Amino acid sequence: MQAPRGARGVRKDAHADGRAPSSWLFPVPVRASRFLAGDASLARFNVEVAQDRIASYSFAAAEKGDALFYDLQTQLQGNSRGRLGSGRSGIYQGHYLKGVGRTPAAANWSDGGDIYHGSGHLSVGSAIREHLITAFLKARGLGAAIVPCEAVLLGPLTPSETRAIRREQSSSRIHFAPADAHMIALTAKPADFARISNFVFALDHFIGTPQRLGELLLDLERYLHPPDAREDLEGAPGGIARALDLAFQRGLANFQAYARIGLFWLYLDSNFSLDGRFLDLETPLFFGAPFVGVSVADIEGTPVRALLGFEEFGFVRHWRLFIAWLKSRLRLLLAPEIGGLREARPYLRELHREITARFSRRHLLYRDVELTARATENLAGALNPGRRDRLRLLELARYALEWRLYRPEKPAPDMAWQPLECQPAPATPSPRQYEAASFIEPAASPDGKAFADALRRLGSNLDAGDLLRLLGKPANFVPQGEQKKQR
C-alpha cells in the first residue's frame, strides 16, 4: 500500500510560487545585511530578517519578494516558553542560515531571562566552534555524521549591541572569545535535513485531506533517508517503517562514533536530524579521545556534578518518545470522529501496524541490557581497559542509561574521579570543570589540545578580514597527523 493518492513523488526543496516546501516552514521577508564573506560566492548569504516588511494591513496580493523560511517545532516533552522553533535561523537559497535576526518563531523576544535564545544574533565564538568541529570531524572521517558548517560570515556590532554584549545580555561571552566584543556572525549549512520536532509540529497541525496527509508522510520518509538516497520514494507503510529503523540505527552509530573521539554535544533536544546527523554544532565539548567523567558547574555557589559520557542514551530516549508519539498520533487519526480521512484509514491502519511490528519490545531501541553492553564495548574497544576497569565502565554505562532514560535526578555514582591536567575548550557560556574516571588518562589528547588552541587563537582575532581568511584554510588549524580518510 502506498501513500494516499495524489501525494506520491519527490518533493522539491523550494517552490517557485514562494510557498514553503514543507509544512513546518514559513516565509519571512529578508533584506541585505552587514555581513562580510571571505569568498565572493558566499556574499549572497548576507541577509537579515525584515519583519517590518510585513504590512499590518494589506488588501492586495502580497508581493513575492526575497524570503527566508524559518521552521516551527514541537518538542515531545514540551517547548520552552516562547521558543516556537528556529528563532534566529532559516532556509535561504538552499542553505540553513543561523544568526539572521529574530524570526517570528522567537516569541521570547521580550523575555529578558531568555536573551541567549531570543536576541536573534549568533556569537563569533559559536560560529567558530561550528566551523572548527566541522573541520576536525571531516579530518577524522566523520563528515557524514553531521550537517556541516560550510561558511561563516562576520559583521560589525552596532553601539547598542556592543553595550549589550559587555553586559552579557546576549549569547556572546567575551571571556571565551574576545572577538565577540567587536563582531557578530552568521553560519551556513546545507538545508537538506528536518528535525523530529518539525514533523511532530506538522502532523499535529496540518492534516486536512488525505492528499495533504500523504505529503506529510512522504516528507517523513524522505528526511529519514540520507540526502543522497531520497529518490523514488512512494510512502508505502513498510518503506516508512524500514526508514525509521535505519534512521535510528544510523543515528545511534553516529553517537557511538562521537563517543570514541570524546565528543559531546551537551544539548540534544531537536538538535539532530531525522536521518541521524547532528546539526546544531554550536556547543561541541571535544576531548579528542574517549572520555568518561563528570562535569562540575557552579550553580549559585554550589558545585553541581553530573556524569559526562554515554550521550547515545539521550538519543535513545528521544527516539523512544518519537516512536511512542507517532503510534499514538496514528491511532488518533484512525478515530471515526476525525472527519475527512475515511479514504486514508486503510493506509493509516497498515502504517500503524508496520511501525508497531518493526518497533516491538524486542527491538534494540527498547533492550536496555544490550544497549548498555554495546555502549560499554564501544568505549572499551577504544580505551582497552583491564578487567577491573571494564567492570567499572559497565557500571557507569548502567548508571548513565538509567539516569538519561528514567531517573534524571539520580546523583552520579561515587567513584574515583581525577582532575584533568588540561581542561578542554569551553563549549557553553556557563564555565565548567571536568574530572575523568580513574581508568581515563587525565592528559588531554593532541586533537583536544589542538581544538582548544585553535578556538582560542581564532576567537582572539579582532580583524574580520583576517579571521575570515584563517577560517577559509582549515589546514592551518587541523592537525595533519590526525587526519583520516572519509568513511
Image (tube, rainbow, N blue to C red):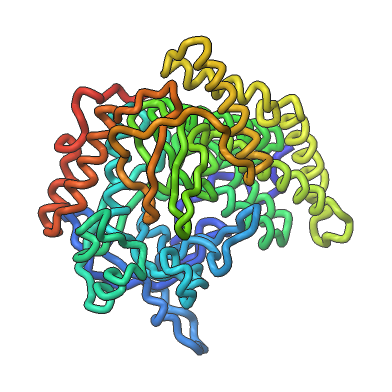
The answer to whether 166 is drawn above or below residue 317 in the figure is below
Residue 276: x %, y % from top left: 51, 37
Asked if 389 appears above or below 133 in the picture, the reply is above
The picture places residue 365, in percent across and down from the top left corner, at 66, 31
Identified at 50% across, 89% down, the residue is 57
Residue at image point 26% right, 64% down: 184
Image-based side of 26 in relation to 185, left or right: right
Q: Most extreme residue toward the right, as rendered?
A: 336
**Residue plotted at (24% across, 55% down):** 177
Residue 308 lies, with reference to residue 271, above or below; the image says above
Q: How many marks?
A: 0
Task: Specify whether residue 66 is in view.
Answer: no
Q: Position of residue 48 (x, y in %)?
A: 33, 69
Where residue 110 sits in the image (x, y, percent)? 47, 77
Q: Residue at x 34, y 28 (%)?
A: 442
Q: Nearer the viewer, residue 286 or 65?
A: 286
User: In front here: 350 or 446?
Assistant: 446
Q: Nearer the viewer, residue 303 or 88?
A: 303
Quarter that holds the N terminus: top right
